[in-house]
Image (cartoon, rainbow, N blue to C red):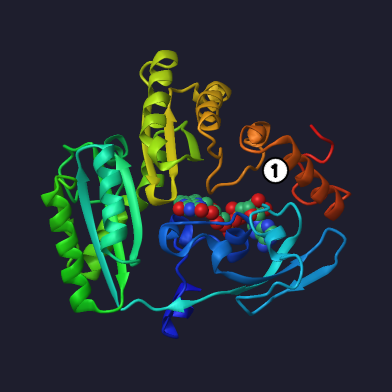
Amino acid sequence: VQDYADAHDFFFPLDLGARGSCTIGGNLATNAGGNRVIRYGMIRDMTLGVEAVLADGTIIDSRNKTIKNNTGYDLKQLFIGSEGTLGVITGAVLRLFAKPRSQSVAYCALPDYAAVMRFLHFAQARLGGTLSAFEALWASAYRLVLERATNVKPPLPDAHAFYVLIESLGGDPESDTAHFQAMLEEAAGEGWVADAVIAKSAGEVQALWAVRDGIPEALFTLRPILNYDISVPLGEMDRIAHRVRERLDARFPGHRTMEFGHIGDGNLHISTHIGAAGKAQQPAVDEIIYSLTEAVGGAISAEHGIGFSRRPYLGKSRSDEEIALMRALKAALDPGNILKPGRVIAIDGT
Ligand SMILES: Cc1cc2nc3c(=O)[nH]c(=O)nc-3n(C[C@H](O)[C@H](O)[C@H](O)COP(=O)(O)OP(=O)(O)OC[C@H]3O[C@@H](n4cnc5c(N)ncnc54)[C@H](O)[C@@H]3O)c2cc1C
């Protein structure tokens, strides 16, 4: 879709690490977000209509082509993000955007989380709506990528507390580049950015993005690994990361834990390797991370869904009434429980 849109001078902004293998049906079923949510939203925000087949074979053709359509319930939303539990998506009308004429990317090192927050707010204001990615790596994650991902060249020395990939997509290559550079210089002058490197070619843009995209590969080498994908209020993010560390230190000394996230979206990823028997300890780590998430009103899944393994914790992010409504929807649309049984919500109340 990205290539097709590009060839026709349009832009499909959904972009994620799984870009080479994922399908649009899978993206829709998981309401995928990716790297540019801060500007364009999740795939839900780029979808005008959906066609789906219900459990009884009924085809629901909701391939709406307009942005505004308030003719009753927005049926496509039943299927987007429902992980295949309410119907099989067989068609979609996607929204394309004007193709950006400029792409400015920099990799920045920052001294602490307060600086990350200030830099984010400053860049949002100063770049006037063109900020398209703000991907942060705590030093723990940056170190792991440099150590274990192939095809990654360190853009900056491993000597800082935080690293941020910042991207701006604009309409005027010459003035946008100067504006982006000036913004970075001001942020450095304020002391928020300690060091930075700006990409000067498409190859350098790719090399900087490779650091972010190298995370799954680097994590994979640390098996068994427990991966978490939570949403928390921005101001709480680093506090939660610290509290998780404290509790893991107490319970699993010697663990190796990495934090990174789509910071502008409040999405924090925590991955931890607690030794060869890690999988057996997953319930204990789940409890630590999901309880801390619940305490700040966060979501136990930001972008990877509920599936089987997070189902027992759904109540930490959803009320009893919400869960009852989800169960009623599942029972109405799939009374025989044939679509992804056991995922997201159990029809029998377990
Ligand atoms: C390396 C990597 C990086 C990722 N990065 C991100 C990220 O940055 N942001 C993000 O949001 N997600 C991310 N993801 C997760 C991503 O959202 C999913 O991997 C992807 O969207 C799923 O697409 P898929 O075609 O692979 O689906 P699958 O993995 O095949 O399926 C996912 C779910 O969707 C259901 N499904 C699939 N197709 C349909 C259909 N046609 N109709 C109904 N249900 C269907 C399946 O039953 C399953 O429950 C990442 C994944 C990987 C592997």
Q: Quadrant of the C terminus?
A: top right
Residue 251 appears left or right of 254: right
Where does residue 59 sit, x and y in percent of width and height?
Answer: 81, 70
Decide which of 343, 96 is in the foreground and name it: 96
Question: Residue at horizontal 22%, vertical 58%?
Answer: 106
Ligand 1 visible in quadrant: bottom right
Q: Position of residue 5 (x, y in %)?
A: 47, 79
Which residue is painted at 46% across and 32% down in the image?
Answer: 225
Give coordinates of residue 231: x percent, y percent. Answer: 49, 42
Q: Is mark 1 within 8 Å of ligand 1?
A: no
Residue 221 in sight from this viewpoint: no
Residue displayed at 58% across by 56% down: 31
Q: Residue furthest top?
A: 250
When the figure is inspected, residue 297 is found, relative to residue 133, above or below; the finding is above
Q: Quadrant of residue 161?
A: top left
Q: Nearer the viewer, residue 201 or 163?
A: 163
Q: Residue at x 19, y 71 (%)?
A: 177
Q: Amino acid at mark 1?
A: Val
Above or below: residue 215 compared with residue 93: above
Q: Which residue is mark 1?
A: 344
Say which element carries label 1. loop
On the question of residue 44 being in view, the answer is yes
Q: Residue furthest bottom?
A: 8
